Amino acid sequence: MARRALTGNVEDLLSLAGLFAVAFIAATILPAQSEAALVGLLVLGKQSPVLLVVVATIGNVLGSVTNWVLGRWIEHYHNRRWFPVSEQALDRATGWYRRWGRWSLLLSWAPIGGDALTVAAGVLRERFWSFLLLVTIAKAGRYIVLAAITLGLL
């Protein structure tokens, strides 16, 4: 019985770590589907939906913070093959950012262009705390809506 409980706890921790990693990666250098991971774990129903949303949000926001840092140091990295945003996407995002300002970060959840906006925020020297607040609102909002739809609340 104790072995079964221990196995369940390890599985729970691994699934949370996996969700965190997928959410982090989805916001940075590799294509990943954090939404699919979240929905899968919600459907399994083994963990608190609130915990799953919080873990996915933290991972995705930290991935965006990585993009912001890369934006701050772009002159050193933008020509590297692993850089998460093409020059064309960055130019487009920088244009949006210059036009709409920090409020464009509320679109950082978007699958197309969202990551580029977070890099552009770093390039254009957005203050970290306003960046963090707006990106967290955007990312958490997306996951909350997704969880509510998945759980039949919307």
Image (cartoon, helix red, strand yellow):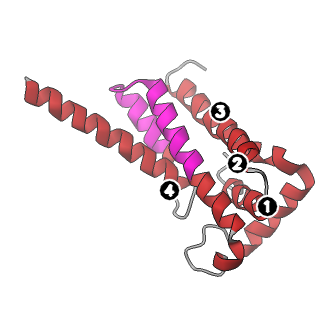
Badge 1 crowding class, 10 Å Cα cut-off, few under 14, some 14 to 19, many 20 or more, is many
Corner quadrant of residue 132 = top right
Can you identify the residue that label 1 sits on? Answer: 93
The magenta segment is 35-62
Q: Amino acid at mark 3?
A: Gly
Disc 2 crowd rating (10 Å Cα; few below 14, some 14-19, many 20+) is many
Image x and y of residue 114, in percent: 69, 53
What residue does disc 3 label? 141
Q: Earlier in the sequence, mark 3 or mark 2?
A: 2
**Residue depicted at 60% across the width and 67% down the height:** 84
Label 2, secondary structure: give it: loop
The residue depicted at 53 percent of the width and 29 percent of the height is 147
Q: Residue furthest top?
A: 153
Label 2 sits on residue:
108
**Where in the figure is residue 21, as x and y percent of width and height?**
43, 50
Reading the chain from its start, which is encountered first: label 3 or label 4? 4
The amino acid type of the residue labelled 1 equals Ala
- Asked if disc 3 and disc 2 are in contact, CB closer than 8 Å, the reply is no
Q: Which residue in the protein does label 4 denote?
A: 25
Q: CA distance from mark 3 to mark 2?
A: 11 Å
Quadrant location, the N terminus: top left
